């Protein structure tokens, strides 16, 4: 048997420790690389899933918005299609009619619009609606702007209580105040006049609230500088507040114009003569007890809808900006 000397045993032990020391760092580095590689793959997979989920959410949102847009556009398409159809030939509910015949115009009978103006005095009704709507819109925007400025900038006793009392009138339905207002106008002798059509709609708590909230967002430094220069309160209101409030004013103008132009119940109650009828009331001439002339009625409805569409197209930029900014107090 070979006898191993102590020196040789020591060398073997040292070599073994060195071998273990050299192998273990290499093994640990490879393990770490594997872990990093698997972690990066997991991170890439998570990113792919996040991108896929985001795209699916966008697709779902687009589908919902497209469905809502189609729901809103279809009635307008039906109205235009009916207005361009031949009188007496339109039957989208007929059993023999195809599903798309009620939504796409098969003929273009532009004479229906001329005929609608001949059957009833639509020109007179149009002028009445235009006069009442423009006067109501201008009056409502003016009174709301002045009242909103007073509640936002002027300091007087009971300002907050008066504002909340004025705001509480928004909770009262219009049908509740219709009869008292009608009785008051009858005592004044204003029934079947333009005063009855215009004056009750020139004041609104909603417009005052919206403009007050917008005025609160405007910096006071501009007003202080104007006061130092000797500008009066009315001058500050005209020269500083109103030019900075174009988005809110455009929004209120659009809402007021649409509401007044499409109003049917109040003009029907306070007008009795054909000379004072507005367009919404005048369109009822196309309907009788037993039949309805749908082509002429829809032709008149298209002509009635055109001003609202044009107003929104021109005020769209200010309207959207006013919707975002109204009601924000900073």
Image (cartoon, rainbow, N blue to C red):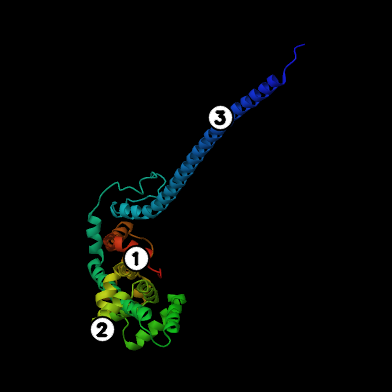
Is residue 79 visible in the rendered image? The answer is yes
Which of disc 3 and disc 2 is earlier in sequence? 3
Q: Nearer the viewer, residue 118 or 189?
A: 189
> Dot 1 corresponds to which residue?
322
**Quarter-of-image position of residue 294:** bottom left
Judging from the image, what secondary structure is the residue with disc 2 in?
loop
Q: Viewed as shown, does residue 20 lie left or right of 159?
A: right
Q: Nearer the viewer, residue 188 or 26?
A: 26
Q: Viewed as shown, does residue 171 lie left or right of 321?
A: right
Judging from the image, what secondary structure is the residue with disc 3 in?
helix
Q: Are marks 2 and 1 in contact (CB under 8 Å)?
A: no
Which of disc 1 and disc 3 is earlier in sequence? 3
Q: Are marks 3 and 1 in contact (CB under 8 Å)?
A: no
Give the x, y percent position of residue 37.
Answer: 52, 33
Tag nearer the camera, 2 or 3: 3
> Dot 3 corresponds to which residue?
30
> Dot 2 corresponds to which residue?
232
Which of disc 1 and disc 2 is earlier in sequence? 2
Dot 3 alpha-carbon crowd within 10 angstroms: few under 14, some 14 to 19, many 20 or more: few
Q: Are marks 2 and 3 in contact (CB under 8 Å)?
A: no
Q: Nearer the viewer, residue 41 or 11?
A: 11
Tag nearer the camera, 2 or 1: 2
Dot 1 alpha-carbon crowd within 10 angstroms: few under 14, some 14 to 19, many 20 or more: many
Give the x, y percent position of residue 325.
Answer: 37, 66
Is residue 272 visible in the rendered image? The answer is no
State which quarter of the image contains the C terminus: bottom left
């Amino acid at each position: 048997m070979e006898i191993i000397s102590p020196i040789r045993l020591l060398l073997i032990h040292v070599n073994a420790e060195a071998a273990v020391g050299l192998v273990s760092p290499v093994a640990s580095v490879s393990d770490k690389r594997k872990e990093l590689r698997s972690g990066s793959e997991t991170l890439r997979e998570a990113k792919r899933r996040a991108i896929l989920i985001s795209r699916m959410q966008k697709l779902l949102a687009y589908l919902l918005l497209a469905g809502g847009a189609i729901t809103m556009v279809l009635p307008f398409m039906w109205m235009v299609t009916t207005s361009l159809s031949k009188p007496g030939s339109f039957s989208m509910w007929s059993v023999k009619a195809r599903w798309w015949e009620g939504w796409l115009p098969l003929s273009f009978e532009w004479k229906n619009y001329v005929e609608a103006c001949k059957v009833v005095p639509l020109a007179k009704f149009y002028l009445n609606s235009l006069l009442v709507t423009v006067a109501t819109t201008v009056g409502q925007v003016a009174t709301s702007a002045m009242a909103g400025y007073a509640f936002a900038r002027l300091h007087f006793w009971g300002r907050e209580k008066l504002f909340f009392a004025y705001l509480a009138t928004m909770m009262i339905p219009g049908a509740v105040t219709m009869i008292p207002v009608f009785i008051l106008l009858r005592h004044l002798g204003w029934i079947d006049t333009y005063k009855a059509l215009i004056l009750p709609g020139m004041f609104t708590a909603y417009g005052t609230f919206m403009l007050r909230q917008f005025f609160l967002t405007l910096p006071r430094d501009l007003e202080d500088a104007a006061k130092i220069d000797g500008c009066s309160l009315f001058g500050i209101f005209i020269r500083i507040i109103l030019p900075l409030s174009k988005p809110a004013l455009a929004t209120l103008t659009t809402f007021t114009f649409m509401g007044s132009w499409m109003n049917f119940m109040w003009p029907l109650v306070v007008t009795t003569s054909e000379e004072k009828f507005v367009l919404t009331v005048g369109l009822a001439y196309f309907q009788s007890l037993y039949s309805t002339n749908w082509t002429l009625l829809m032709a008149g409805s298209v002509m009635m809808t055109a001003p609202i569409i044009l107003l929104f197209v021109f005020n769209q930029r200010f309207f959207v900006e006013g919707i975002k900014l109204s009601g924000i107090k900073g």
